[in-house]
Image (spheres, grey):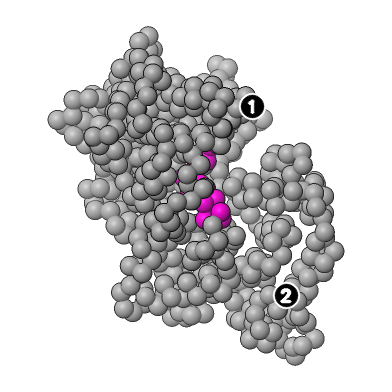
Amino acid sequence: MADFPQAILASKAPKISLIAAPGCGKTTRVLIPKARQILEDRKTDPEEVLLLTFSRMSAIELKAKVATMDRKPKASTVHSFCLAFLLSENDHAIRKRIDCILLEFQKEVLLSDLKLTFPKINKNLLKKTLREFSAAWAIKPHDETFDEEGFRKAFKTAVINWLEEYQAVLMEEIVYSAVHLARQLDSTDFLNRPKYIFVDEYQDLNNLEQEFIDILAKKSERLLVVGDPDQSVYGFKHAHHTGIVEFSNRPDVEPYTNPITGRCPKEVVKRANELLSQADPTREELLECCEGAIDGEVRFIQQSTQEMEFGSVLQRIAYHLNKGCPPKDIIVLSPKQPLAFEFAKYAESRKGTHDISKDTVFVVTLRPQFNDLEQEKILRFALLVRPHSLAHIRSYAGIGDKTHFAKEVFQLKEKYGGIDEALQNANAEDWASGHTRVRSVCERLKDLREFLGEFQNLDSAESVLNALLPADPPLANVRRMFEDLLEPGDTPKELYDKFVEYIRTLSAKDTSVRILTLMASKGLEAEHVFIIGCNGGNIPGENRSTHMSELEFRNEQRRLLYVGFTRAKQTLTVSWSRNIPFQQAKRHHTGSVGTWRRPKQTPVSKLGICDFLGDLSEIKWEK
């Protein structure tokens, strides 16, 4: 449907759906123009126009695209909007906890404390159980989650007790709590305010998130939902990938489809369609090229060893760079995060041999990981903003220790009455000299107490930065993150809240060749795309989900590869190697078809080809 933007822009239907192909311009040709069209009516308050999306990256892109508009609509993730709703209401179950959302590194503190409760349970099992519990808590009524007698029920009780004690929430609680509250309230100004609602990436929302959209749109004048079930890859987060189709089939919805990609060249579209046909051989509607699309190029590389595979890929990257392609227009995708780091390490060490500029860096684009010193400064910032945040105090007390001083903090709470009281009163001299570890925690809390007393009256974000984060190493990187977010007039709270959102996103410099997981490539595009490690042990790999059937898992992994393919604007290169080091296969959980051990040689794991690639027609493997 070449004229689909015009048809949607002209529509006055209260509910509209668009199932859109990758690279069709749904954001720039539909969502933003529709919002701009509505805001041309000066009677419409910009606060009444809401753009929602699933991923943080997409929300950031939406905000950037509306930034130049004279009258700007609101743009947010569904998750962030749910959080704002919960903060707007005072009478609900998690109101006392909602001000403190645990950061990723703080979950390690929770796990250390859980280890005290379950001393015979391996910490890795506790971590796995916490992931499973969090995922279930995101979509089910809390009284139906982990309600089996025995360890699981005890685990749930222990997590809830910890969150209640430290007045904190898990990220996964927020959407369920928002839906639960919205069901109970007949009306609320916050939910009634948006009159024109636009939802992107609808296929990645789970059932509860899609229900929240329905509740939000009850009194709206326009609801436009956009998505593509072929790009749904968040099954591990319980995404309801057929929800966009079900929404489109509702009798009160005006449906549109656009199978035409304006991004991908003909050869990429051909291979992407083969993946779609594998999932459903009877399927008739496939991806289509736009008028004037270039032929493009798809290359398949098979090598004996991983080093040879990496070398072939790096050689092709060097070719594009030396032809004048900017590094930012090249992305390398990996089925697994550890493999991405393996390639980055290889490329950085060998780029000189391929005449790649030393200014070009190969960087794995992931959420930032913070060392102990950085965690300390971040938590100090958090406590300047919220001085009585019990979870932040607890996390601060545990920095730098493998067990996060779990036993010692427990002793401090027993003596002083709680973690907040320990912060106010802890004194190393209250403990005998033999209690070395408890005394050290007392000193940490004393330092924090003195810091908060000295700097608690700072009222500008810039003054807090100067007090906490000097511009020189080793804190320059964290300071730079804050400076990039700082806007004139920001309060410390406003800057910290932006930082919390920022560290859940991805970023890279223009001088970087970005290396990402396939999962993280959603929403991105590049002139030249490389997908490495496409062996059967990596993709589809092992189904480690607790709720997806083997068929569901394989179908989602195929869609994941489809997403990777359709990032490419000019060329796509897909590679794999038959042999990788045995220890690497073990660390990365890469399934193999056998292990080779020869005297005085490092054992290797022999791999098979990815089934999805094996079923493609007429592949010419470069070796």
Could you say which is closer to the camera, residue 248 or residue 452?
A: 248
Q: Residue furthest top?
A: 292
Question: What residue would you read off at disc 2?
Answer: 423
Quarter holding residue 586: bottom left
Position of residue 489 relative to residue 436, above or below, is: above
Can residue 250 be seen from the camera position used here? yes
Position of residue 337 relative to residue 285, above or below, is: below
Residue 357's disc number: 1
Magenta stretch?
74-88
Q: What is the three-letter code of the residue carrying label 2?
A: Leu
Q: What is the three-letter code of the residue carrying label 1?
A: Ser
Q: What residue is shown at x 68% (from left), y 44% (from top)?
A: 481
Q: What residue is shown at x 36% (from left), y 69% (from top)?
A: 143
Label 2 neighbourhood size at 10 Å, few (<14), some (14-19), many (20+)? many
Relative horizontal placement of residue 343, taking residue 221 as reference (left or right): right
Could you say which is closer to the camera, residue 459 or residue 611?
A: 459
Percent x, y of residue 119: 47, 80
User: Dividing the image into 4 quarters, which one contains the C terminus?
Assistant: top left
Q: What residue is shown at x 64% (from left), y 46% (from top)?
A: 498
Percent x, y of residue 534: 35, 39
User: Dividing the image into 4 quarters, which one contains the N terminus?
Assistant: top left
> What secondary structure predominates along the stretch shown in magenta?
helix
Relative horizontal placement of residue 91, taking residue 431 as reference (left or right): left
Percent x, y of residue 16: 34, 30
Residue 115's disc number: none
| Count of marks placed on residues | 2
Could you say which is closer to the camera, residue 246 or residue 310?
A: 246
